[in-house]
């Protein structure tokens, strides 16, 4: 999979570079004519308003990497055909073949070298010898087309070596130790091949088991984490419900306390009213000793008539107790 992806990206990059090169070569001739001497984008004076700057703005929109690609591809011979070598130079064919004069000079020098006992008086003058040993140079041509000429001393020495009989020398034993012959690879038996296959299968089986174990552990971990998250959510819900119930109990307790406080205030107000009237004091005392003495009585005196619905004070007390669920009977009006 990785090799396929790598090959795919390599093809994409190759095609992209090829396309960029084609676009760059399409503008190279135009930029070479109008922008002679411009090697980089910074060399262009964009402050000047002329035909070249206007054209470069258009080219830059299509090919912003023109100068980088131009430096990269350059003028390659496979794209821009150029002449190779000195194809227009005339070839001097006489320089390729040895003349008879050169052979005679080589022979004379060879004879003198073979006769070491020759008197020095018989030797030619050094100036004459220089003329003989240095013939006129041929017309200069390309070195690759000229045939290399060996020096006279080298040719004469070669001639002497060929004529001198070589002496016979006995063969000497070599001092180096011969290398050991390479042993052919030992062919494995069927049992060895079967054992190798079994070991490979065992290794692959072990890796499969390890992979399965890893998958099971990962699945178990995911399951544990999910269950843990669910339990935490349930715990949060229970905690919120618990707090809500506690808040309700607190509100109910506060309501009961407020109810008892109001009942106490009502009872104290009735006691104060009964003590202020001497007539019905005994009646009020007798009613206070019985259960439900805090309830208004229909046989109350005219002073108790203030607690009736027709009076303002009693009605306000009943209205104050109404929001707290105290559904008490309203005070009765005195009988006529």
Image: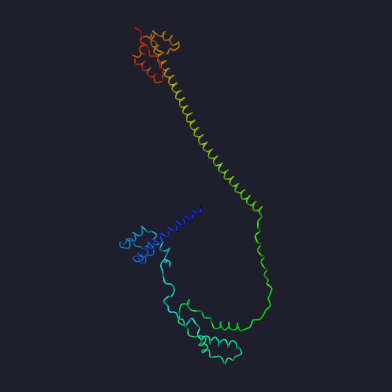
- Which residue of the protein is positioned furthest toward the bottom in this rendering? 121
The image's colouring method is rainbow
Classify 8 as above or below 107: above
Image x and y of residue 24, in percent: 39, 62
Image x and y of residue 319, in percent: 37, 18
Residues 96 and 218: in front is: 96
Q: How many marks?
A: 0
- Which residue of the protein is positioned furthest toward the top in this rendering? 336
- Which residue of the protein is positioned furthest toward the front in this rendering? 190
**Quadrant occupied by the C terminus:** top left
Image x and y of residue 99, in percent: 50, 85
Q: Is 202 displayed left or right of 67 in the figure?
A: right
Image x and y of residue 151, in percent: 54, 82
Quadrant position of residue 153: bottom right
Residues 262 and 157: in front is: 157
Residues 315 and 214: in front is: 214
Q: Is 18 displayed left or right of 151 in the figure?
A: left
């Amino acid at each position: 999979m990785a090799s396929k992806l790598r090959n795919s990206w390599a093809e994409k990059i190759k095609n992209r570079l090829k396309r960029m090169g084609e676009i760059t070569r399409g503008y190279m001739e135009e930029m070479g004519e109008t922008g002679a001497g411009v090697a980089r984008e910074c060399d262009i004076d964009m402050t000047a308003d002329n035909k070249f700057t206007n054209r470069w703005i258009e080219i830059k929109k299509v090919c912003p990497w023109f100068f980088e690609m131009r430096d990269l591809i350059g003028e390659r011979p496979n794209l821009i055909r150029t002449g190779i070598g000195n194809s227009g130079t005339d070839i001097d064919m006489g320089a390729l073949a040895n003349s008879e004069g050169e052979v005679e000079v080589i022979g004379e020098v060879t004879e003198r070298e073979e006769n070491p006992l020759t008197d020095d008086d018989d030797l030619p003058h050094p100036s004459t010898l220089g003329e003989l040993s240095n013939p006129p140079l041929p017309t200069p041509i390309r070195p690759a087309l000229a045939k290399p000429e060996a020096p006279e001393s080298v040719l004469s020495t070669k001639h002497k070596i060929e004529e001198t009989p070589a002496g016979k020398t006995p063969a000497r034993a070599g001092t180096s130790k011969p290398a050991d012959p390479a042993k052919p690879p030992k062919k494995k038996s069927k049992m060895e091949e079967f054992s190798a296959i079994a070991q490979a299968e065992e290794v692959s089986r072990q890796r499969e088991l390890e992979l399965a174990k890893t998958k099971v552990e990962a699945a178990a971990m995911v399951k544990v984490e999910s269950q843990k998250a669910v339990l935490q959510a349930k715990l949060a819900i229970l905690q919120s419900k618990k707090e809500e119930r506690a808040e309700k109990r607190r509100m109910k307790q506060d309501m009961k306390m407020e109810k008892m406080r109001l009942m106490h205030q009502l009872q104290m107000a009735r006691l104060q009213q009964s003590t202020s009237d001497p007539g019905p004091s005994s009646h009020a005392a007798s009613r206070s000793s019985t259960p439900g003495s805090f309830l208004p009585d229909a046989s109350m005196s005219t002073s108790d008539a203030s607690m009736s619905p027709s009076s303002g004070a009693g009605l306000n007390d009943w209205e104050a107790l109404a929001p707290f669920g105290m559904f008490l009977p309203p005070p009765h009006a005195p009988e006529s």
